[in-house]
Image (cartoon, rainbow, N blue to C red):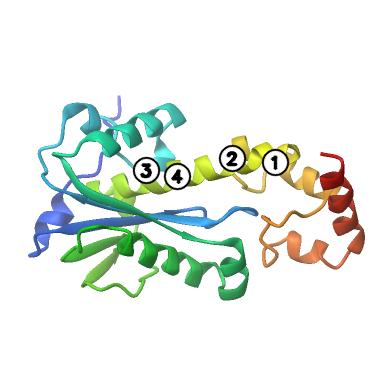
């Protein structure tokens, strides 16, 4: 049986700084919804077993485990010093591009922290403009405990946003697909049109904007709901 490899504090321990924030994002790839970043600072590396057993790259966790980890993160005041959330809107994604919008969300997540970190570990290759030294880490959410915990904050926050939007736009299945381009989501776009929450710079939405009937279909859908 293959042993599960979990993130550690090795990267954090390799840094000289004391307060280290992990940063990660959720929602770079979907066709709809904002991109959300999480930033998190652990107060101690002696984290409770129930959180240690769960914390990992959020994509590797079930929704139930993500929600449990998020609840623990919110309530473990003696373990976690601070966490913050940053959001870049669909309008910002379309006007800036997804890379720049993601960096903006990360900058806002750090700004949302009550405590300024001495250093930041960032998942991926996009390096935002932060008020502290930082380094990017490819697959950091599978390597660094701080980044993994931040990924859970970002993912759960974004999922909640999409679930709320689903109440107003139930045809698109956002409560389940989180705005990603599943077959049923794309079919709903063809059937009902494009909403204000769809990313107009993403395909196939960019191409559909050339067909006015798509917008007319959406107007008809909103008037009937």
Q: Which residue is drawn at 30% across and 46% down?
A: 148
Label tally: 4
Secondary structure under the numbered disc 2 in the rendered image? helix
What separation in Å lies between label 3 and label 4 (alpha carbons)?
Answer: 8 Å
- Which residue carries the number 3 mark? 152
Q: In the rendered structure, find residue 164 and report the number of the disc placed on it.
A: 2
Q: In this rendering, is residue 33 above or below 90?
A: above
Rendered location of residue 81, percent (x, y):
18, 48
- From this view, report whether residue 6 is shown above or below residue 38: above
Residue 92: x percent and y percent? 57, 69
**Viewer can see residue 36:** yes
User: Relative to 50, is 214 on the left or the right?
Assistant: right
Quarter of the picture containing the C terminus is top right
**Quick check: can you spot residue 144?**
no
Please report contact status of discs 2 and 3: CB closer than 8 Å, yes or no: no
| Mark 4, residue position | 157
- The alpha-carbon separation of the residues under discs 1 and 3 comes to 25 Å
What residue is disc 1 on? 168
Q: Earlier in the sequence, mark 1 or mark 3?
A: 3
Relative side of 90 to 137, left or right: right
* Disc 2 from disc 3: Cα separation: 18 Å
In this picture, residue 110 sits left or right of residue 32: left
Q: How far apart are marks 1 and 2 (CA)?
A: 8 Å
CA neighbours of label 3 inside 10 A, class few (<14), some (14 to 19), many (20+)? many
């Amino acid at each position: 049986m293959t042993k599960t490899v979990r993130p550690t504090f090795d990267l954090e321990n390799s840094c000289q700084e004391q307060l280290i924030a992990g940063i990660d994002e959720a929602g770079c790839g979907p066709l709809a919804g904002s991109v959300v970043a999480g930033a998190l600072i652990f107060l101690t590396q002696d984290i409770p077993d129930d959180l240690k057993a769960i914390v990992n790259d959020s994509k590797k966790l079930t929704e139930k485990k993500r929600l449990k980890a998020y609840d623990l993160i919110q309530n473990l005041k003696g373990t976690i010093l601070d966490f913050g959330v940053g959001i870049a809107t669909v309008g910002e994604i379309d006007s800036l591009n997804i890379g720049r919008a993601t960096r903006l969300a990360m900058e806002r997540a750090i700004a949302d922290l009550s405590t300024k970190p001495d250093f930041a570990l960032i998942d991926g290759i996009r390096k935002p403009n932060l008020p502290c030294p930082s380094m990017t880490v490819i697959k950091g959410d599978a390597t660094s405990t701080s980044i993994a915990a931040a990924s859970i904050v970002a993912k759960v926050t974004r999922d909640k946003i999409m679930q709320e939007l689903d109440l107003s736009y139930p045809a698109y299945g956002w409560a389940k697909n989180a705005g990603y381009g599943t077959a049923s989501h794309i079919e709903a776009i063809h059937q009902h049109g494009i909403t204000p929450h769809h990313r107009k710079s993403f395909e196939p939405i960019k191409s559909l904007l050339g067909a006015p009937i798509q917008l007319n279909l959406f107007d008809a859908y909103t008037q009937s709901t």
